[in-house]
Amino acid sequence: MLSLGLMLAIVFAFAGNIELPLEGVWVEDPEGKPVIDRGPEGAWDHVAVDNPFIYIEDGVFYCFYEGENERRQEQVGIAVSTDLLRWRKYEGNPVLKVGPPGAWDSLAAKIPVVARNKETYFLLYTGKDGKGAAIGVARSNDLRHWEKYPGNPVLPGRQGKWDPILTTSPSLIERDGVFYMIYRGMKGFYTDQKLGLAISRDLLHWNRRDKPLRGLDDIYSFAICPWLINGEYMALAQKLPPKHIYLSADLISWRRGPVLTFSAGKIDTPSQPILIDGVLWILYEKGDRIYRARFEPRP
């Protein structure tokens, strides 16, 4: 197994750099209208659609999102688009369901993050059973039909450490066949929250950094760009207002950047930013629906 230091060196050797201003406003577009709405009464996603993650392949955008039904089950579905505006939900949703009673993911299979390794797609997700939460994996050959890995959870909570309860975030970077995931660890459900770094070559076996990342306190989720902006990694952090951009040169030590300003006011979990023709776009959760926004730099 590669050392953590060598793996991080690989990240920066293969990370591209984009020059963009960081001061500006995320403008909801279309204003006041969700691009992915809740399903009809009785649907698997009737109560909420949350936690969007965007996967791009062959000019098609796949939004993996979390849906909730009246029984409070949280499961994963897909919507597909070619323009980030008009989305069509997959008729086979949910593509990742909760496990059977007693399973580690019997109450929730949520917060999806997707990557490809060779010819196989991997979906990292958070499973909950009422006692704790951990991170598992499902695999697919076509992005639509998923099979849970029998060795789940691949990243369990560590009792006696800072991260006995774990969840995924919309954060996953791949460089030259090495994958870097920033995840959320908690002492209790939504208390004593910190972010950690785990590294893998196959998305099944993870080498976890023992200590939490530096400069990040009470961050709920962390939507990280997959490339460098102005020489640093940029992440959109969710926490109590005011929200900020965070920046890092090494994925471990982070500094607080400009305030995140949204024309829509209070928003919840953002997706990772997507760059299209020089414009940054995100999807985000607001009021249990998913909206789209573009970044407008300040003059």
Image: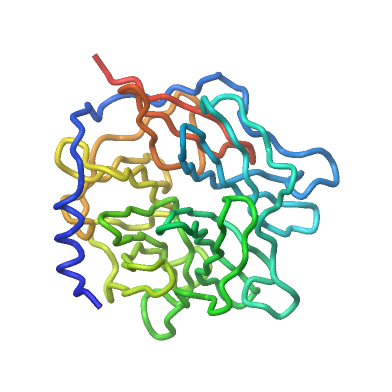
136 or 257: nearer the eye? 136
Where 277 sits versus 125, above or below? above
The C terminus - image quarter: top left
Name which residue lies at 21% across and 37% down: 229
Quadrant hosting residue 148 = bottom right
Residue 4: quarter of image? bottom left
Position in image of residue 120 (x %, y %): 48, 59
Residue 87: quadrant of the picture: top right
Q: Is residue 210 left or right of residue 134?
A: left
- Identify the residue at the far bottom of this view: 160
- Identify the residue at horizontal 25%, vertical 30% (top origin): 22
Would you place residue 26 above or below residue 109 in this image?
A: above
Across and down, in percent, residue 298 comes to 27, 18
* Residue at 64% over, 41% down: 288
Foreground residue among 205 and 118: 118
Residue nearest the observer in this picture, 135 or 116: 116
Residue at x 50%, y 26% (from the top left corner): 264
**Residue found at the very far right of the displayed protein:** 42
Q: Quadrant of the N terminus?
A: bottom left
In the image, residue 263 above or below residue 48:
above
Left or right? Give the position of 200 relative to 142.
Answer: left
Give the number of marks. Answer: 0
Q: How is the image coloured?
A: rainbow
Q: Which residue is outermost to the front?
A: 119
The image shows residue 21 at horizontal and vertical percentages of 22, 26
How far across and down, in percent of the image, does residue 80 sit? 60, 36
